[in-house]
Image (tube, rainbow, N blue to C red):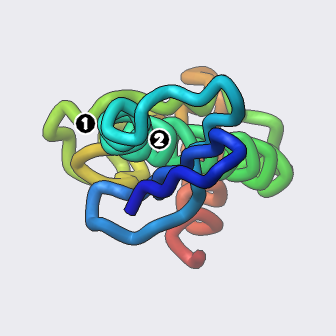
Amino acid sequence: GEADDADGVAFAPLAQADGYTFGVLLSAAPCVPAEFLGMMAASAGPVIESKWRDAKVAALVDVAKMWISMLDTSDCLESVELLDDDGAPGGLIDDETYVLPLSKSRGHLRIVCQPKKTFRTQSALRNSLEAT
């Protein structure tokens, strides 16, 4: 919980939404009341966790984009985008689009090839993605 010492220092645990403590919110002299600091920590903890997770997903998506572009030896890749979950099924959607689901809360990657490339090159990209 919160603590005050003679020097006027207060602290409160920062916790994830599931209650796991990952840090501490400190207030030094002149410190805020321990009760206020506890309310701030209870509010800030899940927000900090959420932003940290969003940053990790964004980094993962950047790595996935780079990895997919490296697999694209036929140079047919037009775009790789992170989109909200719209209920689209995973897999090959049409001759140009492949959807790689992440999760309901994180959405999916949509991989689009240039439409004028041959089916053979699109098929090679699809096979490379499905092999992983």
The three-letter amino acid code for the residue at tag 2 is Leu
Tell me which corner region of the image, top left, top right, bottom left or bottom right, holds residue 116: top right
Quarter of the image that includes the C terminus: bottom right
> How many callouts does the rendering have?
2
**Residue at the image point whose x is 27% and y is 65% from the top:** 18
Vertical comparison of 109 with 14: above or below: above
Secondary structure under badge 1?
loop
Left or right of 8, for residue 110? left
Secondary structure under badge 2?
strand
**Residue at the image point whose x is 78% and y is 56% from the top:** 71
Look at mark 1 in the image and give the residue it sits on: 85
Residue 118 at x, y = what percent? 62, 38
Tell me which corner region of the image, top left, top right, bottom left or bottom right, holds residue 52: top right
Q: Earlier in the sequence, mark 1 or mark 2?
A: 1
Q: Which one is nearer the viewer's eye here, 131 or 119?
A: 131
Tell me which corner region of the image, top left, top right, bottom left or bottom right, holds residue 93: top left
Can residue 91 be seen in the rendering of this structure?
no
Cβ–Cβ under 8 Å for marks 1 and 2: no
Q: Which one is nearer the viewer's eye here, 31 or 68?
A: 31
| Label 1 Cα neighbours within 10 Å, binned few <14 / some 14-19 / many ≥20 | some
Look at mark 2 in the image and give the residue it sits on: 109
Residue 4 at x, y = what percent? 53, 51
Can residue 58 be seen in the rendering of this structure?
yes
